[in-house]
Amino acid sequence: FPSHDTRYEELVFNTNDSQEYVDARLAKVKASLYKELRTAEYPPMEDYLDAIVKGDTEAEEEYKRKCLEVKAKYPKELV
């Protein structure tokens, strides 16, 4: 069996689980969904570090702009 992604263990349910239990686990997953979506779209940190090392303030600002766009696209109140 291939190893499974443990990030989604909260989505594994048993037929005997109560609705309250299922709802609580889904709420936990939804609460952190924005973090995963942001992480997937943020530009590489290497770009920012490279800009700092080179003293390229334009590239630094571009990196920050891209990060802010991602934050706006996936707000904490996503769900």
Image (spheres, rainbow, N blue to C red):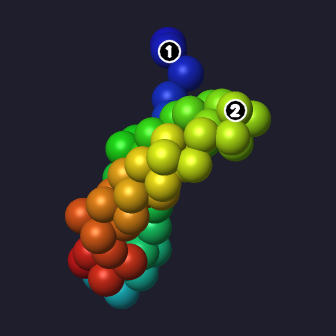
Report the Cα–Cα distance between label 1 and label 2.
43 Å
How far across and how far down the image is residue 46, in percent?
62, 32
Question: In the image shown, does 74 or 53 lie closer to the viewer?
Answer: 53
**How many numbered callouts?**
2
Mark 1 or 2, closer to the camera = 2
Q: Which mark is residue 54?
A: 2
Q: In this view, does 6 lie to the left or right of 63?
A: right
N-terminal label among 1 and 2: 1
Q: Which mark is residue 2?
A: 1
Q: What element carries label 2?
A: helix
Q: How crowded is mark 1: few (under 14 residues within 10 Å), some or many (20 or more)?
A: few
**Which residue is at a point 29% across and 70% down the rendered structure image?**
72
How far across and how far down the image is residue 25, in percent?
43, 72
Above or below, 19 against 10 in this view is below
Task: Tell me if residue 15 can be seen.
Answer: no
Above or below, 41 against 21 in this view is above
Q: In this view, does 73 lie to the left or right of 33?
A: left
Q: Which amino acid does label 1 sit on?
A: Pro
Q: Residue 19, located in which quarter of the rendered image?
A: bottom left
Question: In the image shown, does 1 or 65 lie closer to the viewer?
Answer: 65
Task: Tell me if residue 24 can be seen.
Answer: yes
